[in-house]
Amino acid sequence: MNQVQRVQSLRAAVQAARNDKKTIGFVPTMGNLHEGHLELVRTAKRRAEFVVVSIFVNPTQFGKNEDLGNYPSTPEEDARRLAELGADLLFLPKHETMYPGSLDEQTVVYVPKIGDLYCGKDRPEHFYGVTTVVSRLFNMVQPDIAVFGNKDYQQIAIIRRMVEDLAYPIQVVGVDTVRNDDGLALSSRNGYLDAKQLKAAPNLQKRLSEMADVLKQKPAVISKSALKLLEDEAKDDLKRKGFKPQYITVCRQSDLKPAKKGDQELVILAAAQLGKARLIDNLEVFLGES
């Protein structure tokens, strides 16, 4: 596996693969790779013949008092694991490559409406940073396929909208969330949890599953007031278990707007603080299934 830092070297390697009639797959990451990231790479390997993985801890998606300075970094281990999986190219851009000027003077890519909801409401800087850095990486790599995890459900919805609106010739592929045996979604931030919190953390997914059961058993519950009650009960339950819920919302999968009666394809989105870790999770719900 080759490793490059410069865009010129990246593009030369990608062009050589294109000259060999290979499709280009791309997996953008912030490093500290876990099994969830590796599953994205495996998916890219199945979908494309030349796979590029990037590692860049993007400062513009961190808000004030967030964990940029403490974000875990394991570059040597990451490179080893990627090489074992058969990734073809590791792109390790420096800060000045991604942001050549002052951060407050950089062009920003902003996806309105859907980017203002949920995580965007609680962390207004976050999705500006995500879409800006992903847009830049897409322009640098110019992949045919880009692979993201469905754990960040709102993020992948926003990236799909950006790709459509900006006419990127890129297929965005989502990969199911990889979980521990107890149901906890894998995340680099799980390392912030102590032993007691790790034991409590799976309750987030458990509560979403209980909400999904209610929705499937009683589709008539989908009214504004009934959904609010369901969401509030979930928040109260999680508070009793040590969480500080930021939101738990039943939405339509298509546009992430609040669910209404008659909607069939739903997703429950959740974010909650547990100790030093901000955990996000989601669960798709399909009504009308036999």
Image (cartoon, rainbow, N blue to C red):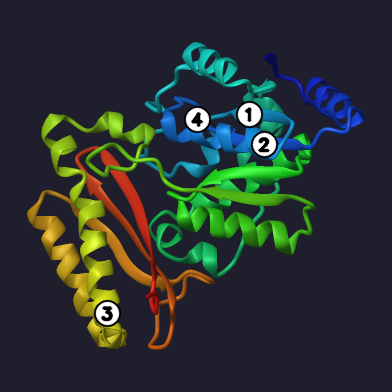
**SS for tag 2?**
strand
Observer able to see residue 105: no
Rendered location of residue 20, percent (x, y): 89, 27
Answer left or right for 13 relative to 77: right
Distance from disc 3 to disc 1, alpha carbons, whole Å, reads: 40 Å
Circle 1 is placed at which residue position? Answer: 53
Which quarter of the figure is the N terminus placed in?
A: top right
Amino acid on which disc 2 is placed: Phe
Crowd class of label 2 (few under 14; some 14 to 19; many from 20; radius 10 Å): many
Circle 3 is placed at which residue position? Answer: 227
Rendered location of residue 38, percent (x, y): 50, 30
The tag earlier along the polypeptide, 4 or 3, is 4
Amino acid on which disc 1 is placed: Val
The tag earlier along the polypeptide, 3 or 2, is 2
Crowd class of label 1 (few under 14; some 14 to 19; many from 20; radius 10 Å): many
Distance from disc 1 to disc 2, alpha carbons, whole Å, reads: 6 Å
Distance from disc 3 to disc 2, alpha carbons, whole Å, reads: 38 Å
- Looking at the image, is mark 1 or mark 4 nearer the viewer? 4
Circle 4 is placed at which residue position? Answer: 38
Distance from disc 1 to disc 4, alpha carbons, whole Å, reads: 10 Å
The tag earlier along the polypeptide, 3 or 1, is 1
Asked if disc 3 and disc 2 are in contact, CB closer than 8 Å, the reply is no
